[in-house]
Image (cartoon, helix red, strand yellow):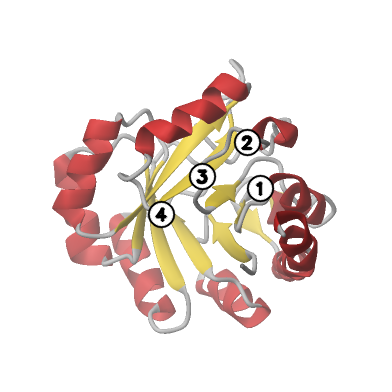
Amino acid sequence: MSVKVKICGVRTPAILDAAVAAGADYAGLVVFPRSPRHVTVEEAQSLAAAARGRIATVAVLVDPDDALIDRVVDIVDPDFIQLHGGESPARVAAIKARASRGIIKAVAVSDSDDVARGADYDGIADMILFDAKPSSGHVLPGGNGVAFDWVRLRGVAPSGPFALSGGLNADNVAAAIAITGAVVADVSSGVETAPGLKDAALVAAFIAAAKAGAPQNQKKAS
């Protein structure tokens, strides 16, 4: 299975176009006011409309209530919803039924027990995203530019396809893919010059490095 790439925290049409041109597979639209990558529902709608037919869109939400779920589905109409908070398996199942969208569930990792928690969402979320658990000094659930020990995924990660995030950049993404067997590489801060400010050249370099890492991943899995 070839590696796919998600550029998360897309905020401008220019970066959306750069991601598409470089071969990204998903564009993440963060609807979470505390994030420097936040876009309003209306801004997300505009970006999703520009993306339609070119790249899949992922609305990234943190512990959303039903009202926000309904607004995002009705106005943004994303291909996927990513849940990046403390949503329980029951809540994820309820959101999936309500939204009728593919669901990506982020699981914060600092040790192997955290990785094992991903199994709680088997058969509920369509994909698990393993991300680094934020330290006590971080107020955001993701996008902190911090990596976790990827070796912890060996022998514990789910049998199905999963995504990897946390501290990835063009220099380390091929190694991360080879170590973990992730089929989606998810990047945000690793393609930025400052929080929330993505750079088209960094986006292109990351995508090229991630796609080049695919043969290593396939060899490891065989």
Real-space Cα separation, disc 4 to disc 3, in angstroms? 21 Å
Q: Residue at x 47, y 58 (%)?
A: 28
Residue 58 at x, y percent in the picture: 41, 60
Q: Which element type, helix, strand or loop, lies under badge 3? A: strand
Query: Which amino acid type is marked by label 2?
Result: Asn
Q: Quadrant of residue 205?
A: bottom right
Q: Please tell me which of labels 1 and 2 falls first in the chain.
A: 2
For the residues carrying marks 4 and 1, which lies nearer the camera in this image?
Answer: 1
Q: Quadrant of residue 135?
A: top right
Q: Is residue 161 above or below residue 137?
A: below
As drawn, the label of residue 39 is 4
Q: Please tell me which of labels 4 and 3 falls first in the chain.
A: 4
Q: Which residue is disc 3 drawn over? A: 129
Q: Which element type, helix, strand or loop, lies under badge 4? A: loop
**Number of other residues with Cα within 10 Å of mark 3, as a class: few under 14, some 14 to 19, many 20 or more:** many
**Number of other residues with Cα within 10 Å of mark 1, as a class: few under 14, some 14 to 19, many 20 or more:** many
Q: Please tell me which of labels 2 and 4 falls first in the chain.
A: 4
Q: Are marks 2 and 4 in contact (CB under 8 Å)?
A: no
Query: Which amino acid type is marked by label 4?
Result: Val
**Number of other residues with Cα within 10 Å of mark 4, as a class: few under 14, some 14 to 19, many 20 or more:** many
Q: Are marks 1 and 2 in contact (CB under 8 Å)?
A: yes
For the residues carrying marks 2 and 4, which lies nearer the camera in this image?
Answer: 2
Q: Please tell me which of labels 1 and 3 falls first in the chain.
A: 3
For the residues carrying marks 3 and 2, which lies nearer the camera in this image?
Answer: 3
Residue 187 at x, y percent in the picture: 63, 53
Q: Please tell me which of labels 4 and 1 falls first in the chain.
A: 4
Query: Looking at the rendering, in which quadrant would you find the C terminus?
Result: bottom right
Query: Which amino acid type is marked by label 1?
Result: Ser
Q: Which residue is disc 2 drawn over? A: 144
As drawn, the label of residue 47 is none
As drawn, the label of residue 189 is 1
Q: Please tell me which of labels 3 and 2 falls first in the chain.
A: 3
